[in-house]
Image (tube, rainbow, N blue to C red):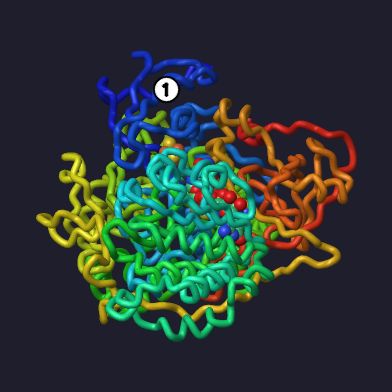
Amino acid sequence: MAQRMPALAASAPTETHCPYCALQCGMALTAANGTNTVESSTGAGLVTVAPRDFPTNRGGLCQKGWTSASVLTAPGRLTRPLLRPHRAAPLRPVSWDVALGHVAHRLRQIQAAHGRDAIAVFGGGGLTNEKAYALGKFARVALGTSQVDYNGRFCMSSAAAAGIRAFGLDRGLPFPVTDLDGADAVVLVGANVAETMPPFTQHLRRAVDNGGLVVVDPRRTATAEQAALHLRPAPGTDLALALGMLHAAVADGHLDHAYITERTTGFDAAWRVAARWWPERAERVTGVAAADQRAAVRILAQAANAYVLTARGAEQHASGVDTASAWINLALALGLPGRVGSGFGCLTGQGNGQGGREHGQKADQLPGYRRIDDPEARAHVAAVWGVDPENLPGPGRSAYELLDSLGTDGGPRALLVFGSNPVVSAPRAGHVAERLAALDLLVVADVVLSETARAADVVLPVTQWAEEDGTLTNLEGRVLLRRRALDPPPGVRTDLDVLHGLAVRLGQPADRFPTDAETVFEELRRASAGGPADYSGVTWERLRAGEQLHWPVPSPGHPGTPRLFLDRFAHPDGRARFAAVDHRGPAEPPDAEYPLHATTGRVLQHYQSGAQTRRVAELVSAAPESFVEVHPDTAARAGLGDGELARVVSRRGSAVARVRHTPTIRQDTVFLPFHFGDDQRANLVTNPALDPTSRMPEFKVCAVRLEPLAGEPRRRRPSDPSEETA
Ligand SMILES: Nc1nc2c(c(=O)[nH]1)N[C@H]1C(S)=C(S)[C@@H](COP(=O)(O)OP(=O)(O)OC[C@H]3O[C@@H](n4cnc5c(=O)[nH]c(N)nc54)[C@H](O)[C@@H]3O)O[C@H]1N2
Ligand SMILES: Nc1nc2c(c(=O)[nH]1)N[C@H]1C(S)=C(S)[C@@H](COP(=O)(O)OP(=O)(O)OC[C@H]3O[C@@H](n4cnc5c(=O)[nH]c(N)nc54)[C@H](O)[C@@H]3O)O[C@H]1N2
Ligand code: SF4
Ligand SMILES: [Mo]
């Protein structure tokens, strides 16, 4: 079928950024031919991607970035709203007016019967700042619901909570990525950047050459291969490891006493815990040799320029906040944070993972990284929104608790999803799918028919990345302009259009939900003014002119803040705080029935739930299906040969994966990627034990056993998005 394809809005290459991760590599998009009519099946190649010289990627791109234009013309790209009139009916194309009219009508009905909190909203860290802002405002003002949260809860929430506790402010990297170029030593904790941000590794070159890269990961990853020292703790034992290393720092005389005295508080209380964690004790819990712990501390302490960086391997635990705090304690003890050329940071994951956690789609938050329970913040934001602060709801449930409550007594009866695919990416995904099925109404706005969209009553087709303008804030707190390079396919609308259309149908004044992204950003500037993440001095004009603006940017003449904390930390006393944290171990220890630790994570070729990358032929042929990394001896004990299909079984459910003999993984640990759908979902087995502070689920460790999959070994293909609408 011939269909109108994206036409270039301008003939010159458009300078923009990658649709995927928080590195936000700079790229340029160009049309490969001048026509706007092509066969949809051969649409890939219509737009070409070229890397450009931007500080985070310096001309590099990963395979996902190179192939990102394929998603614009992917088979199964949604172009018409879909609606199922009742739960048993198939999804059928309808007009926008019918779709939005139906949603608004049902939302009103459900709220009339069950109250305002009967509607829930779930957002995403891939949404632009403008969308994230508009979504939070839509939930609080148009729906008046407190029940809004987003997938960043599964991503950066532990790092954010630990950063706020220690430094008084959460910006993943409080320094530009390029500062790492000068690092002699870098400790990467639970970060596999060689696969999750390949161009980032060029910033580690000096540390690698210097013998200063230390990687903490239960697996020998592509990143660990480059390290001078690879520490291989059992999953969920980082906290003990960090305590052992703090102990070693003290015992071996590496403390920066002057820094601790002048710039921090709380060392004594933190030390009282670490004093009990001599490295030999930490070795017994973690499996990391005491000598290696000491060596790692020595590498950090002896370097002129040293950094500690954490990512999801350290943070996605029921003790994620305390674990991140323990690594911060080590960095503080060595005097690293808030210095030029040294520091501590957490690597933000999603394209707008940083901005997405600042502008109000989080349950406890208002724009500008304000707290929704702070009366001053409520008054400020309500004034910008033109509403009475009394009418703003309070904090709602966190992401997993929200999903878990859907369709229960007292839980929401309708859910609107923008920019997430929780049927694949939420912990205990089988249960989450059941909760979604118990709803009276599920509405999903997406670019493709994701697994979550497949379960929806109404699917709203939206524009993506290269078809619209918007800002994102990358992993170093730099605000970027992602530009429209193409016309969207006819029939799709922007998320801002969708929110506007719904708001008006819910009785909101038309000008309260603008559809133009720059207009929304102007409002976001005012809403964020005076908040911790102050964007009031950022304008699209400055971004168009190529200015490098790291927040806070508190006035239009302000140059931005590439490096935070150089003079003082953001607590009222200007000091960073040690946290007295102790090890507590995984929520679900292995036992006779489930003897192995399962951990989960990423591969180079796929992004997140795979909704986008499983539709790119090149990526699917390189990484077609799920697998489980398992030590050959462990596989043999379970009767599994290399390449055979296994069932990975936990108390929550089981996932099918092909066995990959991996002699370098710990014998007590298996690893699964979480990018695949249906019965290959790693999240069918994961444990939704939550961190008490951040409400982060324990994606990185649960107890499992391996079983051979009965029957024929089969090859699977990614789920075909056209199945349901054909
Ligand atoms: N290719 C690709 N790149 C991506 C993404 C993607 O989906 N695909 N997603 C983006 C997003 S949103 C994010 S959040 C980032 C995530 O980036 P990373 O955090 O680098 O990615 P993960 O693979 O989730 O986890 C990193 C490592 O943690 C290890 N690990 C598991 N358990 C533990 C543990 O208990 N302790 C320690 N120390 N390590 C452990 C795993 O073996 C894994 O190698 O990647 C971003 N980039
Ligand atoms: N087991 C396990 N599970 C995990 C993790 C793990 O390490 N292990 N990591 C967690 C982490 S760190 C993260 S960040 C989450 C991510 O998991 P998800 O939240 O599921 O992330 P995505 O797959 O990126 O989903 C984004 C969806 O939004 C759509 N989309 C893209 N752009 C737009 C847009 O502009 N508007 C709209 N409306 N839709 C859009 C995409 O097509 C896709 O369907 O997964 C978490 N789940
Ligand atoms: S590293 Fe991240 S931003 Fe860069 S090309 Fe790959 S996915 Fe895109
Ligand atoms: Mo993430």
Q: Is 704 drawn above or below residue 260 in the view shown? A: above
Visible residue check, residue 439: no
Q: Residue at x 50, y 63 (%)?
A: 120
Mark 1 CB within 8 Å of ligand 2: no
Q: Is 134 drawn above or below residue 238 in the view shown? A: above
Question: Measured from the top left, where is residue 500 in percent x and y?
Answer: 34, 51
Q: Nearer the viewer, residue 274 or 119?
A: 274
Visible residue check, residue 32: yes
Tag 1: amino acid: Met
Which residue does the numbered mark 1 point to in the structure image? 5
Q: Quadrant of residue 268?
A: bottom left
Say left or right for 709 vs 259: right
Q: Residue at x 32, y 59 (%)?
A: 174
Image quadrant holding the N terminus, namely: top right
Q: Residue at x 10, y 55 (%)?
A: 557
Question: Measured from the top left, where is residue 370 in percent x and y?
Answer: 32, 70
